Structure formats: structure tokens, C-alpha cells
Image (tube, rainbow, N blue to C red):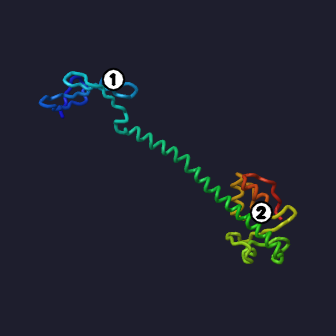
Amino acid sequence: MRTFLVEAGQVYLVKTSNHGNINFDQILIRSKTIHGCEKFIMVYHNYIVREVRMNKDQRGVTLIELLAVIVIIGIIAAIAIPMIGNVVQDSRDKAAVNEALNIIHAAKLAYANNQEIFVNDSVTVADLVSNGYIQVDGYEGVKVGKNEGGWFLTSNKKNRTAVNNLVGNNNYIAAADIITEKILVAALEGNEVQRQPPS
């Protein structure tokens, strides 16, 4: 392969080919650029044989194009990662609320079968666990009971935080509040209902 210039910047490729005993000089000359597509003319001994188009797709990736792709991926990641984190936290909060509802259902079953473990219409979660009505951890000192407003349990950090997160109000349930069954059901749907005063 050999190269030479006819006009500066015009000749792209010169290749000598042997067909029989005749040598041909093949030259690609850039004729024009249209919409990012470079158009070339193939010449054999000054005779135009065919036009050849070289698209951008035939060239390598530039550094700017690579950087653009990296920036786009970074933007997508910056949007997606917090959303994934919110979904994970939301599922944890719903699991905690469902666990609190299961404790209330266990207390209802215990109330129907064994009222002796109830004191003033309330029972500790520890008593429900020790009598085999439910198996949970992290509810030390939490009581479940019933009053004129229905079934409730006293709040702890786990169920209080879960309810407040689901309704989007950090001041909805305070440490001294009780959490009624109605509050738990509404929290699963992201709704607030009127709270009962502590008993």
C-alpha cells in the first residue's frame, strides 16, 4: 500500500492491484459531506468506478460520545437508587405493621380462649408468646388490649416508626400513644385516622 496527495486532504487510500499483467491504482477521494455521512469517489487511473459512502457507524467511538454515555448512566443511577431504597423501606414498614396486626389477632384468639392471662382487658405480648399464641421478637413491655374504641397495642419504636413512615407524618404517633387496629389498617393504605388518647 502507498499513499500520495493529489490535493491536500482529498486522497484517503491508494492501493495497487494486479489484474492479469495490468496494475491499477485505486484511490478514494472525498467528494462531500452530507448530514454527517462522508461521500467518497473510487477512482481507477482517473476513471470513476463507483461512489462509496462511509457512515459515522464505521468509525470508532469518540471520547466525547463515551463521556456522554457515562453521564447518562450516572443520571439514571442517581434517580433509580433512591427510588429502590424507598421501596425497600416501604416494604419493611408494611411488614412491621402487618406484624402488629398479627399480634392483635393473636390477642383476640387468646381473649376468646383464655381470658385468665388478661388483666383489665389487656395482655403483654410476652404473655402471648409464652402461651404459644404468636412468635415475635422486639416487643418487650408492649401490651395489647381492648376498649370502647376496639383493639389496640401500646407503641414501641418499631411499630411507631413504621406507621409514621407509611402515613408520611413523623408526628402522627408519639411514644405515649396507643396504636389501634384501625390506625394500622389505614397506615397500610397510607391514610391517617383519628388517634385515641393513651389509656
Viewer-nearest of discs 1 and 2: 1
Residue in front for this viewpoint, 98 or 44: 44
How dense is the environment of label 1, judged by Cα within 10 Å: few (below 14), some, or many (20 and up)? Answer: few
Asked whether the viewer can see residue 9, the reply is no
Q: Which residue is at a point 83% across and 60% down the rendered structure image?
A: 197
In the picture, the quarter occupied by the N terminus is top left
* Residue 146, image quadrant: bottom right
Q: Which residue is at a point 47% across and 42% down the rendered structure image?
A: 71
Asked whether the viewer can see residue 139, the reply is yes
Chain-order first, disc 1 or disc 2: 1
Check disc 2 and report the residue beneath it. 176
The amino acid sitting under disc 1 is: Lys
Position of residue 62 relative to residue 174, above or below, is: above
Check the image and name the residue furthest to the front. Answer: 20
Check disc 1 and report the residue beneath it. 32
Residue in front for this viewpoint, 1 or 183: 1
Q: Which residue is at a point 73% across and 76% down the rendered structure image?
A: 132
Position of residue 196 relative to residue 41, above or below, is: below
Relative image position of residue 195 (x, y in whole percent): 81, 57
Q: Is residue 191 left or right of residue 3?
A: right
Relative image position of residue 111 (x, y in whole percent): 82, 72
Q: Which residue is at a point 52% across and 47% down the rendered structure image?
A: 77
